């Protein structure tokens, strides 16, 4: 392993982050578990950053990919592609967007790029509203709308970005308000902001902020925003890269917690739908999707092999009601972790929905972030046989827990027990 780490450092960028003091090489997985190169077995509570949505080595997906690879792997969007059409039909129907069109990409970053291209072209302006503490990808335009300093390496951007309050419920100037007053204050802030600028193209928002530490506003905030946005024809882009496909348990899409004034104009997705295959995409009303007046293709978006994986994975998800499982097992896991957190001075909050859970850490006796303890807990969890993630934004640090949606009650209990020991080792 040390040799591989040395080789990694020799040929890959310094800014390519690795977890753990002694980085881990994962060689194979099955169900909710993975194994490293030394044969150690781990319960996976991060799933390749929320990509392994159903299970590792899911037989239905493995079979679909193998059979498709035996026929043809790729032909590009210049030719008709049956698996791509079939998956697009299913996603269009599930999206809740009327007269929907679907464009496939290879990642969530590229999906958000495409959404920004569509919105700015349709609206003929490069001004975009985004949320503080947000993350939307690593490309030039996606970095330009990311409201998280730790993931924004440049201030240069092709877009003019204005940041809005509301993505973080328990911090910031409105944190002490009740939910109703919090939403009203954020709406007032939005109205005031719009009074100082020409009408923007769109608001892009994650229903639950992923990299930012699984933070979210009260239900209905984006519905209230949408009412204001519609007065000026401003589009709403829901970034569902991490919240989509039932992970939150209560809803299939994160936007549905804010759907009182209708669905978003544009929806982006990625990660979980491929169960590890590189699939991203955009759903938009036909008039928005078709607004481009020049040719465009995608060489690798929507390849036959990734579409076969997506179809098999989506079918398994729906047929086995993994959204319902996320609601049930995730609810038990959140309550178990909250009971532990109540005894530990370094845990500020356990938050989330379904199997998308954040544990915010602070230095005991303060409200200040504790990134050192976050790293300590990550290491201790690994030693106990559990893999988790971490994140956070301005002056915050959080553990990120997002297992495959087929997680069992027994596995949730096992993971919670390991995490409890890891938390106690730090506090």
Image: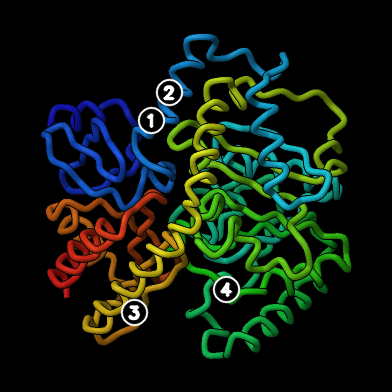
Mark 1–mark 4 Cα distance, whole angstroms, equals 37 Å
Q: Nearer the viewer, residue 300 or 315?
A: 315
**Dot 4 crowding, Cα within 10 Å, few <14, some 14–19, many 20+:** many
Q: Position of residue 395 (x, y in %)?
A: 40, 71
Q: Residue at x 35, y 69 (%)?
A: 332
Q: Sequence-wise, which precedes: disc 4 or disc 2?
A: 2
Give the side of residue 13 with respect to residue 171, left or right.
Answer: left
Are the two marked residues, 1 and 3, in contact with CB atoms closer than 8 angstroms? no
Instruction: Tell me the residue that label 3 is attached to.
Output: 348
Give the side of residue 52 with respect to residue 36, left or right.
Answer: right
Mark 1–mark 2 Cα distance, whole angstroms, equals 6 Å
Quadrant location of residue 371? bottom left
Q: Which mark is residue 217?
A: 4
Q: Which mark is residue 39?
A: none
Instruction: Tell me the residue that label 1 is attached to.
Output: 59
How many numbered marks, from 0 up?
Answer: 4
Mark 4–mark 2 Cα distance, whole angstroms, equals 40 Å
Give the side of residue 78 with respect to residue 355, left or right.
Answer: right
Q: Residue furthest top?
A: 71
**Dot 1 crowding, Cα within 10 Å, few <14, some 14–19, many 20+:** some
Q: Does dot 2 land on a helix, a strand or a loop?
A: helix
Q: Is residue 29 above or below residue 321?
A: above
Q: Residue at x 84, y 26 (%)?
A: 294
Instruction: Tell me the residue that label 2 is attached to.
Output: 63
Q: Nearer the viewer, residue 79 or 298?
A: 79
Mark 3–mark 2 Cα distance, whole angstroms, equals 44 Å
Q: Is residue 182 above or below residue 200?
A: below
Are the two marked residues, 1 and 2, in contact with CB atoms closer than 8 angstroms? yes
Q: Sequence-wise, which precedes: disc 1 or disc 3?
A: 1
């Amino acid at each position: 392993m040390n040799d591989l780490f040395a080789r990694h450092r020799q040929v890959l960028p310094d800014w390519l982050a690795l977890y753990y003091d002694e980085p881990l090489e994962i060689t194979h997985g099955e169900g909710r578990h993975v194994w490293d190169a030394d044969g150690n077995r781990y319960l996976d509570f991060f799933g390749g950053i929320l990509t392994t949505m159903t299970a590792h080595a899911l037989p239905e997906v493995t079979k679909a990919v193998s059979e498709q690879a035996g026929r043809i792997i790729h032909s590009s969007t210049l030719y008709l592609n049956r698996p791509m059409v079939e998956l697009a039909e299913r996603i269009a129907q599930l999206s809740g967007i009327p007269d929907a069109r679907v464009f496939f990409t290879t990642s969530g970053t590229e999906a958000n790029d495409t959404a920004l291209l569509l919105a700015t072209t349709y609206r003929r302006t490069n001004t975009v509203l985004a949320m503080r503490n947000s993350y939307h990808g690593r490309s030039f335009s996606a970095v330009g709308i990311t409201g998280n300093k730790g993931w924004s390496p440049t201030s240069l951007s092709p877009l003019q970005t204005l940041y809005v309050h509301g993505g973080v419920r328990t911090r910031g100037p409105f944190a002490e308000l009740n939910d109703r007053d919090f939403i009203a204050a954020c709406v007032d802030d939005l109205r005031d902001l719009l009074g100082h600028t020409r009408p923007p193209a769109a608001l892009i928002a994650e229903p639950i902020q992923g990299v930012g530490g699984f933070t979210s506003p009260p239900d209905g905030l984006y519905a209230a925003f949408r009412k204001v946005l519609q007065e000026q024809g401003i589009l709403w882009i829901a970034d569902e890269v991490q919240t989509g496909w039932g992970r939150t348990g209560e809803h299939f899409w994160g936007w549905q917690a804010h759907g009182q004034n209708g669905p978003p104009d544009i929806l982006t997705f990625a990660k979980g739908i491929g169960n590890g295959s590189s699939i991203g995409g955009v759903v938009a009303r036909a008039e928005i999707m078709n607004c481009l007046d020049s040719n465009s293709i995608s060489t690798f978006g929507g390849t036959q092999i990734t579409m076969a994986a997506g179809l098999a994975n989506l079918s398994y998800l729906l047929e086995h009601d993994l959204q319902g499982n996320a609601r049930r097992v995730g609810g038990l896991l959140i309550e178990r972790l909250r009971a532990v957190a109540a005894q530990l001075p370094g845990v500020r909050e356990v938050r989330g929905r379904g199997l998308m859970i954040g544990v915010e850490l602070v230095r005991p006796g303060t409200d200040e972030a504790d990134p050192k303890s976050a790293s300590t807990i990550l290491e201790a969890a690994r030693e106990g046989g559990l893999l988790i993630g971490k994140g956070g934004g301005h002056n915050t640090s959080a553990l990120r827990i997002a297992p495959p949606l087929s997680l069992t009650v027994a596995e949730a209990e096992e993971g919670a027990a390991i995490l409890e020991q890891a938390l106690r080792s730090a506090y």
